[in-house]
Amino acid sequence: MSPLQKEFEAFFSNPNPLCEFIKNIANDGLAILEVGGKQDFWANANFWSRLNYTEKQAAKEAKSWKELIHPDDRHMEMQAYRSLVYRESGAKYDPVLRLQKRNGAWVWMRLQGVFLEEPNPRVLIAFTEITDLKHKEEFLQHSSEMARIGFYDWDIKGKSLYWSPVTREIHGVEASYQPDYRNAIKFYKEGRSQQKITELVDRALHYGEPYDEELQIVNSDGQECWVRVIGIPELQDGRAIRIYGLFQDIDLKVRTEKAIRSERELYRQVLQGANVGAWDWDVDSDRMTLNRKAAELLGYDLEVMRREGQVYWFDLLHPNDYERVWRELKEYLVGARDEFNTEARLRGAEGNYRWLAINGKLFQPDLHFERPRIVGIWRDIHYEKEKLSYHSTFIQEAPLAIAMMDTKMRYINCSHKWRTDYGLEEQAIIGMSHYEIFPEISQEWKELHQRCLAGEVLRKEEDLFLRADGRKQWIRWEIRPWYDGNGDTGGIIMYTEDITQHKKDQETLARTQRAFEANFKNGAIGMAIIGPDGSWKQVNEKLCSMLGYNEEELNSKTFQDLTHPEDLEKDLALLADLSTGKISHYQMEKRYFRKDGSILKALLAAAVVRNSDGSVEHYISQVIERD
């Protein structure tokens, strides 16, 4: 065993959890390099296996490890090494370079090194293979050369907007599609993108400012796409008369860059993981270790926690969270859950409880672990939960049917009205999936939920909900996303109003109206609807035949015009009492003048229909001919 290997193993025999963390996640290799002297180099088996060597082959065949570096990259590595060793201000050893494999192929590696002064000056290097990432970067470069770039031209004075064929293709519209400003804006994704393009165009119009922005559109097929939009205003007398520019499909580029950034960030956090609280639990021996950041999140000193036996963080759980967390953890250990990812309150140094997001990954025994263990991290979410608690209190006491769910459609809270409207008073629904509570939820509703989680606000005035027991329930609803402290979607808030009785009342009213209209039209007696001024608003065929007028002629007259003068005073007096509410209806015998001048003797029955404010809407008259 070489001296450097002994130093390496001695370094990682340190019980410091950070050493264990680095040792076990640096799967692409770790090495130690002598500073000064012969600059001896020793790397572990993982490093040599990445280059297709066994340790024996490496000892016999591999030259100096620096000779494995691509000639074009050696100078860069040497500069990084010298800056680190000479302790230059801001220096770090973080080159990305190519190493040659045993079969002659090249592999991209990221090298991250730290300088160790004691007991002897050494550089500890962690290797991360990023060949796939580099290939993605090269692909992005080729994509940029072959990028689809369209053109647009908006003649503001002429009120015309031109899209080039590529611009139309990016929007997913036919060649015959004629865009205008309003429908062009609607293609941008609701929320940030639509607001931003509106603001940019407005500033271009009023201040002549050009723009160059990456935004999202939703094409005619409903697919989201990242685009780069460049706008150049043409000014006349200080105002824009034209805006033209480029429109480029950058969806693949943006999504790939995000993936690369995500992977790089993951590698950075793994190798520099001291910025998150980390925990390590040896399941068989039931021994726990925490890193210093984990202790700081709760206001503890790590050494004090170790001395007082508080690193076993399960003992710090809030009593209301203890049983749930243990149940989730046990389900994960036996394979009933795919992941251990929970939120819980842990007791801090001052006795207060703090909300943390806690996750962990189970590692079975292998070359690195003799026994099964769970390694995980903590994240402080106390502010987010406090804000959420405020919203939850508001929702719970709201007089409306409101429910709050997370991104997996699990209930966070709901109002009392929600429980009573849906018969959930006795059911413990918090933490359960909305789809468990309502298994009859349709695929259409599930798609609406996903659209809302993507940022849309959706509503409908009337919607039929078929319950699992066969009941029909009419609801008015609205769903909108809610956001956490980082501006990320935390889930949805759903408002519903049960309008089943309202719909029944509408249907009853409609049936009554239809029955009245049928009786009115086909009645065996004369019927009329009279306005407050005495005009004939509507008459049936029987009354027309009795008086000898057609409907249009009668509608042009008042009942006073056709009433015999000797009967008019009594009729008007009764009508006045009916109008003021002294009586609810009246009957009288009276005479009408027919169109031919003859007299019609009849029995009149009258009633009143009022508006919601009590005023007269109209009178209903029934006229029965008397011998």
Image (cartoon, helix red, strand yellow):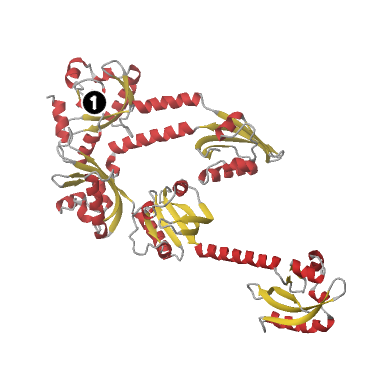
Horizontal placement of 52 versus 622: left or right?
left
What is the quadrant of residue 540 in the picture? bottom right
List x then y, in percent, for residue 139: 43, 25
Above or below for 41 versus 524? above
**Count of numbered circles in the view:** 1
| Local crowd size for mark 1, using a 10 Å CA cut-off: few (<14), some (14–19), many (≥20) | many
List x then y, in percent, for residue 311: 19, 50
As shown in the figure, which amino acid type bears the numbered disc 1? Phe
Above or below for 513 versus 151? below
Instruction: For residue 574, say whether it is visible.
Output: yes
The quarter of the picture where the N terminus appears is top left
Residue at 23%, 30% (x, y): give it.
124
The quarter of the picture where the C terminus appears is bottom right
Horizontal placement of 551 versus 332: left or right?
right
Q: Residue furthest left?
A: 1
SS category of the residue bearing label 1: helix
Provide the residue designation for mark 1.
47
List x then y, in percent, for residue 114: 26, 33
Above or below for 27 versus 483? above
Q: Nearest the camera: 237 or 611?
A: 611
Q: Residue furthest right?
A: 597
Instruction: For residue 234, say whether it is visible.
Output: no
What is the quadrant of residue 534 in the picture? bottom right
Above or below for 24 versus 413? above
Residue at 71%, 81% (x, y): give it.
587
Q: Nearest the camera: 402 or 299?
A: 402
What is the quadrant of residue 263 in the picture? top left
Q: Nearest the camera: 490 or 434?
A: 434
Horizontal placement of 609 versus 374: left or right?
right
